[in-house]
Image: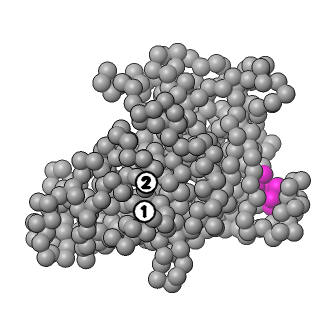
Amino acid sequence: MATMASLFLKTPGPSQSLPKTHKTHFVLPQNLPLSWRSKYRAGPPAAARIRCGLIEPDGGKLVELIVEEPQRDLKRRQTLSLPQIKLSKIDIQWVHVLSEGWASPLKGFMRESEFLQTLHFNSLRLGDGSVVNMSVPIVLAIDDSNKNNIGDSSSVALVDDKDNPIAILNDVEIYKHNKEERTARTWGTTAPGLPYAEQAITHAGNWLIGGDLEVIEPIKYHDGLDRFRLSPAELRDEFTRRNADAVFAFQLRNPVHNGHALLMTDTRRRLLEMGYKNPVLLLHPLEVLEDGVLDPETTVVSIFPSPMHYAGPTEVQWHAKARINAGANFYIVGRDPAGMGHPLEKRDLYDADHGKKVLSMAPGLERLNILPFKVAAYDKTQNGMAFFDPSRPQDFLFISGTKMRALAKNKESPPDGFMCPGGWKVLVDYYDSLTPSENVRVPEPVPV
């Protein structure tokens, strides 16, 4: 699952300073009238006002699949008489995702029709004819033994590796798991070495089972971070409590450096200029709380529970769609989101610009306003991150995520002003904690 926490934060206003960083390319919201769009190209008037408030979840209602507390003992007893399927760690993470409504309107693991629509259309057509985005299959694989054991049963019990009941899957449908097709359509390649495919597809069963989930109790990991795992419903409640009239989401897999902080501040400034009164930021990693890079007094910390595929433009649609269900109506996207290096060749697997282009065209994401940005650089004349100035390229140093990880592994420090010391220490300590076998080179995700 995601190893870094998400921050849902109310950013400081323009008068409050933050460390310097990214240059932002701002894309105008699609719901602005054409007459406004030409005016906004020169800078939106402060009085302009567009639709405010939290965006509706996909399907119009947030799906929550956790059994009410008075019924939980009954459901646990029910699992004793059902065929059992043992879940992997990744399976349990998907149960978590489904149970809280991140994948709304899905009500359980995909049946074949949902699986095929996801693979071939990156979307689902609902009963009323509307379309919602769904780009990543959320499926449960079983083997021949599981299939034979289930037989004609319409329900199965899902248990963890210690046989503790996790959920009941009802009205089940079993269908063929075409691994090659799934891999090719999700990643655009079947090359060996794709991390998620190696973990969850290649050695998985030859069948998939779909159905409606009843999750017996909220998923907990008992790793000291459960209190940071807020559901979409909890996040929506928090945004409402803060009187947010816009929520803009920013996803990173690299630790946040000072360049990202300026991007966040600059984006909020632009939203204020458009007429929003209280835009609230939805962000990933946790380290920005250290050393005052962002104000912890105005920050809500949460973790996005989805497993990571590194499936580039296909996966970034899932990340964006999930944020709609958490209440976001703006999404910031950078270079090669969710991408990785080719597992066999020394090149990127995806074009660096395709993620943001796909998001602007993806079916079912029309309600989400996409905000691309350009990468910032370290300004040697200012000893800090700043907007890149093409008139003096010799003054800037580009530090990629790959370079940043290499420095941390070698216990070397980046230039002063690149990242807060507390965040850097977290990164160094993480790599120092790995065993030699864990610290070997794997296909590197392309830096954001």
Camera-nearest residue between 86 and 442: 442
Which numbered dot is residue 186? 2
- Determine the image quadrant of residue 294: top right
Camera-nearest residue between 439 and 175: 175
Question: Does residue 108 sit above or below 445 in this rendering?
Answer: below
Question: Does residue 58 sit above or below 340 in this rendering?
Answer: below
Residues in magenta, as a range:
270-275
**CA neighbours of label 1 inside 10 A, class few (<14), some (14 to 19), many (20+):** many
Does 271 appear in magenta?
yes
Camera-nearest residue between 224 and 385: 385
On the rendered structure, is 118 left or right of 174?
right
Q: Position of residue 209 (x, y in %)?
A: 26, 66
Residue appearing at x 52%, y 70% in the figure:
132
Amino acid type for the residue under numbered disc 2: Thr
- Determine the image quadrant of residue 76: bottom left
- Residue carrying label 1: 119
Camera-nearest residue between 187 and 13: 187
